[in-house]
Amino acid sequence: MAAGAAEEPEISRAKPRGHVRWIVCAFLFLAVVLSYVDRLVLPVLKPDLQRRYGWSETGYADLAIWFQAVYGLSYVIFGRLVDRIGAKAGYAVAVVLWTIGHVAHIAFTSTRGMLIARIPLAMGEAGTFPAALAAANEWFPARERALAIGIFNAGSNIGALLTPLIVPFIAVAFGWRMAFIATGMLTIVWLAGWLLFYRSPRDHKAVGAAELSWIESDPASTTAPIRISLSHLLRMRQTWAYVLGRFMIDPVWWTFLFWLPDFFSRRYHLKITEFGPPLVLIYLCADIGSISGGWMSSRLLGNGWRLGNARKAAMLAAALCAVPIAFAASAPGIWTAVALIGLACAGHQAFSANLYALPGDLFPRHVAGSVIGLGGLGGALGGMIMAEFAGTILEHLGSYRPIFVVAAFAYLAALAMLHLLLPRYAVTELNNVR
């Protein structure tokens, strides 16, 4: 794979000043919370709707597969779009699309019908991470970037935590359709705040000179803003390290999101109103992992570690946390299973916080969105394969054991692959190729 490379960038050790960038991070955190709430309403309602409308396991798996197919393709589109229109407009388009799709679920009762609604949901939610990572690249230097990503990525866990707490009670009190309407309305409030507040650092009146200097403290890119074709990006090791990393770890997270309520219903006979406590604990663990993973590499950087070594060390610690989930399906009690799954979720989010920082670390800002989009496609393709595997296993074996065994070793395999592709965590040098 052809790719020019420079040495790892030197990381500034200056002290930061100001706080506007953390308000931006809070906006990104809330957006991720809302996107995951909207994404997870259907999985939380799945056991009840499956009994009510006669859904099959393979029918639900097909819904997950096609959601991920649309999500992956839209991720590439949004990655390119965000490179052109920026984080502010990109996020606005994403929110409008996913809200339309989310509320549209109320019109259907079959898995095929639900799939129609999930197409615009998938398209819009595909824009969340390209836009969020573009904002992180714009507002945070390398030393803080993984921490910021870890914080707003923790919103996925808060969303996953809140959904089983609020959705069952809305559904029981007001009907399942109201669960989609009530949660969908919240994104409009966020969108108004985003459009009013977000600017680039240099255009934001609240950003002082000291904070702006900190935000721009990384060495300036030597690559002029030029258009780079996807085929050119796909000839680079750095791109493939990110794409294959997402291909290997995203399917595990998708499996947790789509099937954990079903696992607890099937294995421990929990009812829809009883999902809350175990899922809350699992996603609290994931929150801790998300922030800790970003903090760990940032702390190592502050202690003088090179950028690549800091990222890889944090990912290794995270990968080891996932290994015990291999035993979750045979856990003697529900809380043992919750502990094993929670540890794996913490490991996933810690790993992700550092992997998601790779495009901003190694690519010029004007092409990072395209790399993020390609990675999202890789993750979605892996998720489709995993969904087909999970649906087939559950349909014919009725056991989660093979699924959890795959999850246990996905992260160590992903880290080994990343290290083989990038033994030196080297910045790309792009040629003027369209």
Image: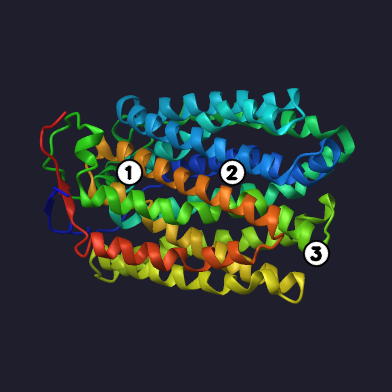
As drawn, 111 above or below 316: above
Q: Is residue 13 visible?
A: no
Percent x, y for residue 310? 31, 67
Residue 4 relative to residue 197: left or right: left
Q: Is residue 322 visible?
A: yes
Which residue is the site of mark 1? 137
**Residue found at the very far right of the displayed protein:** 173
Q: How is the image coloured?
A: rainbow
| Disc number lying in front (3 or 2) | 3
Within 10 Å of the Cα at label 2, are there few (<14), some (14-19), or many (20+) other Cα atoms? many
Percent x, y for residue 315? 39, 66
As drawn, 205 above or below 163: above
Q: Earlier in the sequence, mark 1 or mark 2?
A: 2
CB-based contact (under 8 Å), mark 1 and mark 2: no
Which residue is the site of mark 2? 33
Within 10 Å of the Cα at label 3, are there few (<14), some (14-19), or many (20+) other Cα atoms? few
Q: Amino acid at mark 3?
A: Tyr
Q: Amino acid at mark 2?
A: Val
Which residue is the site of mark 3? 268
**Residue found at the very far bottom of the displayed protein:** 332
Q: Nearer the viewer, residue 326 or 26?
A: 326
